Every structure is written in C-alpha cells, then in structure tokens.
Image (tube, coloured by chain):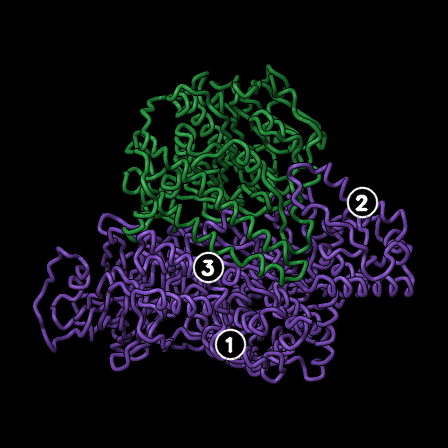
Amino acid sequence: MRFSQILRILLIPLIGAVATGVGSGAPPAAPAAPPAGGDFAQIARPVLQQFCIECHGPAKQKAGHRYDQLAGYRIEDRNLWAKMHEQIASGEMPPADHAPQPTAHQRQALLAWIEAAAGDARRVAGTGGTRRLNRRELSAALRDVTGLSVDYTLSIPGDGKVGGFDTGADALQDAADSVSTVMKITRRAVDGIRFLDPAPGQPVAFKPAETDNPKRHFETLLDPAGKRPGKPRPGKEPPGLALDPSWLGDRESTKTYFPIPADGGAIARVRLRVAAVKPFPNLPNPRLWVEFGGQDFDYGEVTGTLEKPQELVYEAQLDELPSSSKGVSLSLASRVEVPYAVEGFPNDEPEVKPDRPQDVVPGGVGLYRPRYDRKLPHDKRPVPFVMVLSAELEADHVAQWPPASWKVDLGPIGDNAESARKLIAVWAERAWRRPVAAAELDRFNVLYAKLRKDGLSFDDALRAAFQSVLMSGGFRYLPPAGDPTAGQYATASRLSFMLWGAPPDDELRRLAAAGKLRDPAVLDAQVDRLLADPRAEGGFLRPFVTQWLEMDQPITLVMDHIRKQDFRFGRHLKASMKDETVRYVATLLTENRPAAELVSSDWALMNDILARHYGYPPMIGGELRKVVLRKDDPRGGGILSHAGIQSMLCWMGENWVIYRGAWALRHVLDDPPPPPPLEVPELVPSDGKNQGKSFRELLVQHQADANCTVCHKKMDPLGFAFQNFDLSGRWRDVEHEKYARDEIDGKIAWKGAGKTRPVDAAGKLPRGEAFESWPEFRQLIARNYQDDVVRGLLKGWVIYGAGRLPDVDDLAGIRRLMAEQKPAGYMVRDLLKGLVRSKIFLGE
Amino acid sequence: MKSPWFSRPVPISRRATLRGLGGLIALPFLEAMGGKTLAAAAGKSDPARLACFYIPGGIAAGAWFPKEAGRNFALAPSHVPLEKHRDAFSVLTGLSHIQGRITGHVHPYNFLTGHNINLTPGAITNTVSFDQVAAQHVGPTYLPSLALSWTNGVGTSTLSRNALGVDIPAIADYRTVFERLFPPADARQLADAKARVELDKSVLDTAVGDIKVFKDRLANGDRHRLDQYLDAIREVEKRLGDRGDLLERGRPQFDEKGVRLEAPSGKQSMREHVELMTDLIALAFQTDMTRVVTQVLGGEGGPNYNEYKDWAKAAGGQLRGAHDFHHKGSQGGDGADAKVLAARDQMFTACLARLMDKLKAIQCKDGTLLDHTVLMLGGSQVSSHSGKSFPMLLAGGSKLGFKHGQHLRWKTDEKPISNLYLTILQQMGCPVQAFKESNGTISELVA
C-alpha cells in the first residue's frame, strides 16, 4: 500500500469525525482495512478522477453521488458501487454528450476492478443480511408460537424500508424504543396463554332459536344484567339474526359489548356461523363488515349458504381497542356495493335535482338498488342479506398451551419443575425455529425457578420464562439463508418468511433437519408448495406486489364517470382495483406464465364491480376471475392498463404525465430516475399562465432547462403513453382542459372541467423509440424492454427475499439467471425458483 | 381526531400474584402543586425543558418574514398573535441544513437531525436528532422524552431519532400520552408497576444470555446489528432502573379531571388538536415527567383538517387538500391559496402564544416555567421543495440565557441551523461542543 493511500484512509474518517460532531451518525471510522481487490489508486481512481469527479465530486454531486472521497471498496459503500457499476456497464454513464469518454479498455478495467473488489469484500464479510423481524413478521411469529389468531400489528409501529420493501436489513434496526415496544407485545402474547390455570372466562353462545328477537338477544348477550328478551320460538323463521344491507353511508349496525375484565389483558374471541341469503336470483353477494371497538376488522364477502354456512373467527386484544363505559363494542353490519336491479321494484335513487343534470343516469329504472318496504318478510325482500346462524362470544379468552392441534405429547403436566422444563423446550424450539440444546435452556429454567421462589404461580413464572425466550436473539432475529451455524434451519426460515411472511412449518423443518434444503429439486418443490398455501397471499403476494409497485397510494375516482360510486360503492371498488393488480401478478406466478404478460396479455381479472367499471357484462360475486379481453378493448392486458395503477398515479390531480412516466421507469422498466433536484419549482398546470395549455405545451419547459432535461427527457415522453387513462383508470378518447378537486357528501371527487380535446398519447421510450399511440407503446415495450422488466422484478425479489439491495455480485447473479431463462421465455415462477436456488438467496 | 390507538389505563400486571415480587414500596409522595412546578413546590431550582414543533409543507412567505431585521422590526402578519410575548421570542431567517439539504415530503426525517438522508441510494439512513441529545443530558425523568404527532408512527410522523438515527414512534392520541406520562395513582397499582419493573429486568437479563454466542457466529458485517440489539436492551434495562426509582416518587398531584383528553368539537380540528397536545406538554413540564418534547403539527399531504374549509371560504378561494394548499399557498403572492396558508401559519403562532401564556402562569423558584423552557416553532421549507431558508421562531428560556425580541437574518447558506441546535443544547447545560454541521453557536441569541 502506498503512503498516500494510507494517509487518505486515515484522514477521511478523521475529518469526518471532526466536522460532524455529536450528530455524526455514520458508524465510527472502521479500522482501515486494506482495500480488497487490488490497487484502487492505480486502477480505479484515475478513471474516476478523469471522467466522473466533475459531476460527482466536491463541486457537484449529481444524483447525490460523490466519488472523490472513496478510498477503495468498503462494504458500507456497496450500494454506491453497485449503482456505479450498473451505470457504467449499461453505457448510461458517463453521459453520451460528455467529453472525453473513457476508452473501452478503461471502462472494462474499472468494471473488472469493481467486480473483483466486491467479490473479495463478500468473501471477507459475507453477504450479511441478519435482520430483525419486521412488523407483520413479528405478529405472524407470535401467532405461530402462541397458536392464537390475534393481530399484534395494531401496536407495533411501521418499519423503515429499503428500496420500498419492509424486509431490508439496513432499515430494520433496533433501539431502546423498539425493544420496549417488543417487550410490551411479547408480554401480551404470553398473557394470552395458560398451562394449569383454569379458563378465566367461558364462551357465551347465541342461540337464535331461543328467541323471537334475535337482534336484542345478540345485543345483550354479554351484559350480565341484561335480560334476554323474547320467547323461544323453535322452528320459527328467521333461523338466525338477519342483517339487512345498509346503503347510503349510514352507520346502521348490530352492536354488542365486551366487558373488560378487571385485570385487563384479555382476548376477546368471536366465532360466527354466517350465510348469505338471496331471495331473488342474480342478487349480488352481501359483505359483512366487522368492527371491534370501532376499528375495522373485516369487510369480506359472505358466500356461505344456509345449508353450508361459513365460519368466521375474530380475536382481538381488548386493551388495544377503544372502549366506552359499556365495554368494547363489536358491531356487525351488512353492505351491498354493487349496483343491481330486480324486476318489479323501482329504483331507490333519490330524485334528480334540476341543477344537477349529470345525476341523470342513463339506463333507466333500478340502476343500482331497488326500493322496498322494510315490513316485507325477509324472504320477499329484493336484497341479499347476511344471516348470523350462531355465535360464540368470549370476553376473557386465554388459550390452553400448547394448542391441542399441535398434538404434542408431553406426558402429564403438573405443578413441578420437570413440566416447566418440558414446556420451555417446546416453546423455545418453536420460537427459535430450530432444534434447541438442553444447555441453551438452562437460564430460562433458572429464571422459572427463581420466580417460583419469589412467590409466582406456575403459570405466571412460566409466562415470564416464555417471554424471556421471545426477547432473545433467536426469536427476534433472522440469520441469512446461508448462515452455516444455524444449519439449514436458517434457509427454512428465510424461505418461509419470504413466501409466507411467517415461520417455517413442520415439513420445512424436517427438510432442514435432513439437510435437503440446498437440493435444487427439493427447493423447487417447496416453492411450489409454499406458493400454493393460503399463507402466500397475505405473507408474500400482497406485500410484495404492493411494495414493488408502490401501491399504497390512494386511488382517485372521477365523479363524472362513476357517479355515485365514489361515496356509496367506494370501498369494494377501490379494494378490487388494488386486488386486480396483486392477483394478476400472483396469477403469473402460480400459473407460471411468461413475464411478458406483466406488460402485455389478452386477459384480465374481474369481479362484479370491476366488470361494471370496465364496461363488461355483469358478473356476480366479488371474487376475481379470469376474463379474456374483448378484441376491441383498447386497453389490453397487463399491469399498466389496470385502473388501480393509473388511477393512483393521478392522486394529486395534475401532472399525471410526469408521475406516471416516473413510476413506470422506477417500477416497471428498472430505470429509476434520481430524486428530484433541490430548489426546482413545481410545474402547476392549473396556474393562471398555464391554464388551457396541453401537457405537451407545458412540458416544453422541461426540455428548455438543462437541469430538468436530464431526467425529464425520459419521464415526460414516456408518461404520454398513459394519457388514454382517465382519473379513474378507465379508457378515454378525449381529455379535459383541467381537473379540479370537488367535494361531495364529504368525499373527494375530481371533476374534469373546461374544454375537451382529443387525447395525445404520442411519446418516446427511454431508449428513444417513438410511439404514436397506446397500442404502439405496448408493442414496443413488449418487444424491446422485456429484459428490463424481468431484471426489475428480480431485483425486487432480491431485496424482498434476501433483505438487501443487490450488490455487484448479486447483479452478476441476476444476469446469469436471466441468460439461463431467457430461451424459455422468462416463465415467472421459474424465475423465482431460479433465484431461490441461486447463491443470491442461499448464500455461498 | 379519530385515531385507531385509543386505549385505557392498562393495569400493569395481568396477574395479581406479581405483587409479591417488588417488596415494600414507599408511600407515594404527593405534591400539592398549585401554580408551581414540581421543583418549585419542593423549593428547588428548575431544570431546562425543550419543545420543538414542526410546520408541515411550506409557509405563506409573504406574511411570515418581517421586513426589517434587528430589534425594532414590525411584526409580520403571521406573527401577530405573539405580540404580547414580543420580548420573549425571536424570528430567525436564513438558517437551514446546508450539507443536509433534502427535498420533498421527507423533511421531517432530518428537520432535527441535519443528516442528508439520501446519502445511501435506496435506503434512508439517519442520525440522532438534537432533542434526543438534550434528552440524554437533562434527565432522567419518568419519560425520557415524548414524541407527538398528528398520527401515530414513525418516518415522517415523528421528529425524534435516537442515537442510532432510528425513529422514535410518535403518539397522536391524547389519552395514550396522558397515560404514558404518569405513574399509576393508587398504591396497589404502584406496587404492581414496581414489581413489573423487577420482572422485566429479570426477563431481559435472562434473554440476552446467549446474544454473545449468537453474535460470535455471525459474519463481520452483521455483528453491529446484534450489538445494536444488545445496546438497546441495556438501554431499556437502564430505563427500567430509572423508572423504578422514579416510581418511588409516585404520581404527582394535580387537577386530573381538568385535563382535556377529547377534542371538544369531536371534529377534525387542527387547532383543537394542537391545543390539546400543548396543554399536555405544559402539564408534563410542570409535573416534570419529561423535559423534552417534539411534535409534528401535520403531514405534508394532509390530513385535510376542517379549518381549511373556513380559511378557503374567508379567502374566497377554492377548497383544496392540505397538500395542494402547501404547494399552491407557498408560491408567493397574496392569492387565495396564500391567504389560506397564512391563516394556518397564524393559527400555529396563536397556539404557540397560548402555550407561552400557560407556561408563564406557572411559577418556578426563579421566574416562570417559560423562562426555563426553550420553544422552537419552525419548518424545513419556505415554498414547496425549497429547503434554503427555514421558517423559524425561538421563544422562552430567558433563565437559560436566551435573549429575545429580535429578528436575526442571515444570507442563504451563511449559517447552518445546526448552530442554533448547538446553541440550544449548550444553553440547556448539555456538555456538547458540536452538533452535525455546526461551526459555532449563535451568540446574538445569548445574553
């Protein structure tokens, strides 16, 4: 190592420390390890100096990057190096108009140096990626170990994100406050289970046959002073508690109250058997809205029938929920959100006001809900309703542990140390997701014994020991999949947390024990099995797609097109719009379809409300089904034509061209623009001087300013492709001069106003290909950008599954995987399997 | 405001038998406080307090900045509610994060830290916020610090970041704040609490038994993460120790029924929300349950509080969402949108004036609680996405050596706001010589 280099390594951290003082958060200067991968000063620095420092040095830090302070490849800077490598390798940097350009040899030398240095660094430090469980994983792991179905996320704060994902190790840190929170949550979890103690409460059963007033009966069920009204009417209709559908945003519901036990800490448990009753053919399915303490718990479609009812179970930690003097409320309501008509019943639409001609809905009578006399018997009403056939309510539920369903045979359990030891061992194995040696458990047994001596009961002392197991590293932290010391149990955990968001099950643990989890065929079979399990939906498909496509943005709907729907039928439609995209990507995975279908296909998923939204023939039921698109439907299939995507990118009401273009670059084309520069005023289309101009006229401003052009030359021309989608994500051929925010019944609506003009959807793709229309754009993107789309998806999986931004080595792995799978047409599930089999996921 | 986080007083223990654990406990020492601070009631001198408030979005610049600098400046329209406290506050113009300049909706991340959070592509990194540096040195108190907000959570919902730069979750619900603030009132619950502290200590102590073993098996790059966990647990244990000691003092006596924990109108009112929170802050400071508070006054993109309707009507303008008002009202001029934003700014300063009234009415051994409290009201942007000059008011703290009644103005990028933070820390008696970008203190503010 040269002297100057040593000096530089020593100086940089020192200067940093002096200048930043107390607030300096960067970890203190690491001891100066020799830079890996050969001589930085001789090979890499001169190239950087000559071609990059001008824009990424002391004077300017374009895209926030600065290279003059680099003194070699440090693992802490791996993301910077990965980005640099990508940009140089793709030819994106240095910019084409930048003179001088490096020679091919210089370019290669720098890339080779980066790859070698990255490889060296990884061999020394490993891929890393040990991280704590995030919010939803912690809740799932607690549910797994306790056997309860309580949602613990209610009081866990959200997590930081890496590249938009909540599984990134760098953002999952711990500090006193997060640990305090986990103390609170784990205590709640252990307070929900018991061993020798008798059950503190008993479920109260609601038996409709014993009353002629099921509503009052249900409402007073848990009230100790409440008189059960009504007389038994065996065999009389109705067979249960009928929940009439409510509309018009009223809050009609059937409520009962859970008393709060004096010592708090209880779990309320509700078991319902429900059926959807539809007295006329072709009625939509009702939804059951369940609120606990005024908080939303469920809004699901009811599809069970009187012959084959549906069972629903809700568990909630009472002290998480708001209460009144009566206790915590449980309210049940039924909603119908799909417009429908029944012959013989008029439409219940309020009269159209003369000054609101836009309310006149074409199509005549009964457009969205029939009017009927509430005195009609249930089986004569033109509405679908939810029938609660039976219910079991328990106000102080504490579950026997271990759950009977585990079928663990521990022999007789009594108030003695041996029983405690056995229970602690079962708990620890489940909590730590691996076999546990007896010696590892000594200290928990000691804690148990000490607490017994202090006067605690068997159950209380054991609960404390259990909580202590949860607070140790084995529960809270996930080692990387390749962690050699945890054996293949680390792999099992990583796999199940990736594809289920939850701990591994028996089969995965058995395979880990047998050492089979590095066998490609076994891994493939497990990916298939895990994806087919219902846990994949909430634990992988939904969180992955939502975060990958940044779908947590609100959906906008336009009053003019949807009319009443925004405020009366809003929830089901908005949820379905998001579901459409999630399920579409999920279908590509589960059916192993070609990745090209991400952006171009001839099918879509629809349900009752989406069929209506898109103008397809009526459907019954909220479940999404595959529909082959009409030949004349200009939208075509693929996530870019999903109403939910295009609508959410309009949520600020203006500037859609830019947001949609930037979003497509970031989330679909793997070409994310850097964050907007500082001090740049925003382009506001509704500003006086800008009003009435087309987007194209406005965006000329971006081309005029060199600061803007850099990024906007890609975003703006691309964004024009989506101009045929209106604020509600539906197809349009004309656009309005402007769109204004309006408010109706307290809900937001966006209204088009002013003159209209034909939609102008001509633009350019990032590599310069011009298109004149949406169909042309789709063709081009499917033909020329497949690799980019696939690479973006794979990068997303790397962050999600391995918990880190892909480094230089991972990017090489992604390239290999793509080369291998391209000939077969990039089948989506095969890509995922390939990634799981690779060392990106499995480690070295 | 509607928040999903209401909760009741939670008994400390689930099981009565825990009570055997804590041993004997001293009778709670109840203070008859009246209009005095806890320290004053005991005839002692008061420690320093700090409250920082963050203004979301931009401001109506035309109405915010006074025309003249110096001592004899005419109050700017947005600061008129502070007229009666003229000598107890200053306007600071031209300060900002220079190295740590960022843009967009992420401002609350670094408002109090000054860290350039975009340094690592794709990941948000951060460093300690200066309120937490203060909290480290001015305690211990029953609560080390209190992070408040318009919504529960982390990220842009909170201003406070701990020593590792990790977000400290903020609370938006009045009842939760109230319940966190005080030890339980009755002796039985106190004994429970004490027993729980002891039990928690044993649980944690046992839990970390294997961390060293676990850590030794990890790759180099990962060890720091487990160090972090271990440090966090030690910090929790230390807090448990402090808490145990503070529990001995019991719950201070004050008019608990007079504390408002529900918004009177029951509507989404921004003013009511801020007022209820600042009432709790005054109470927390008076009873000395905590000495450091931060509060995010709203989000960059909402909520769309009810007041916007009235302001839009009064200004004769269109009703927009809070986000659009932030954008359109901060572009200068005196259009309707700017008037709406100015009305909001003035409401914030009126809330500040109200808090100052409250603190001024509480006596210390020397001076009033206002004289021992540093209040900071400011934001990170003048107009949307412009972080060059922070709107910033500093008030109170005369007994800590602050000198007010001035409008101090600097050129853009002349002084980092870290200098202000350092000045505050030093006047509060924290033994720190630098904070983030600081290159000195602001001597003009100090008597």
Using the image, tell me which numbered label, if any, was put on residue A10. 2
Q: Mark 1 highlights which residue?
A: A509
**Three-letter amino acid code of the residue under disc 1:** Arg
**Three-letter amino acid code of the residue under disc 3:** Arg
Residue A302 in the image, given as x and y percentages of width and height: 33, 72
Query: Where is residue B131, by image quadrant?
Result: top right
**Label 3 crowd (10 A; few <14 / some 14-19 / many >=20):** some
Instruction: Mark 2 or mark 1: name the one nearer the start of the chain.
Output: 2
Label 1 resides on the chain identified as A
User: Same chain for the residues at labels 2 and 1, yes or no?
Assistant: yes
Q: Mark 3 highlights which residue?
A: A443
Label 2 resides on the chain identified as A
Q: Can the viewer see residue A683?
A: yes
User: Same chain for the residues at labels 1 and 3, yes or no?
Assistant: yes
Colour chosen for chain A: purple
Using the image, tell me which numbered label, if any, was put on residue B429. none
Q: Is residue A401 left or right of residue A830?
A: left
